[in-house]
Amino acid sequence: MEGVTILDTIKDLPGWASAVIIVGIMLFVLCGMAGFSVKDKIRYIFFAFSILGVIAIIIAIITFSPEISYRVIVDDNVNMNEFFQKYELIRREGLIYIVRLIEG
């Protein structure tokens, strides 16, 4: 769009992917440690949950698509109605707008 200057592109990890990665790491570490401290067949259950944690991490990393937003400066001659029809405002930092393209 003419009159809009893109300063920076921001790629954010979606919230669900971050949560899956954190839970997967916790599951891997806690079940792995518990698996070494118990005996017999219960050990295999803990190791199975540990492997599920690793699988969850791998799936989250492979399937996530980053949310892309932009830091922009808008000139005075830009029609703000048209600007907000094209971009979704995430937040404003002084004269800098953090926006995301509206799909469709």
Image (cartoon, rainbow, N blue to C red):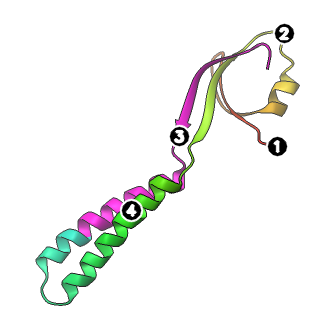
Q: Which residue is mark 2?
A: 77
In the image, residue 84 sits, relative to residue 52, either above or below, namely: above
In the image, residue 74 sits, relative to residue 65, either above or below, namely: above
Q: Residue at x 21, y 70 (%)?
A: 32
Question: Which span of residues is magenta-colored?
Answer: 1-30
Give how far across and how far down residue 96 sits, in percent. Answer: 64, 19
Nearer-N-terminus badge (2/1): 2
Label 4: few (<14), some (14–19) or many (≥20) C-alpha neighbours in 10 Å: some
Real-space CA distance between mark 3 and mark 2, rounded to the nearest whole angstrom: 30 Å
Q: Residue at x 39, y 62 (%)?
A: 23
Label 3: few (<14), some (14–19) or many (≥20) C-alpha neighbours in 10 Å: few
Give the position of the C terminus as an image quadrant: top right
Q: Which residue is mark 4?
A: 23
Q: Which mark is residue 12?
A: 3
Q: Which mark is residue 104?
A: 1
Nearer-N-terminus badge (1/4): 4
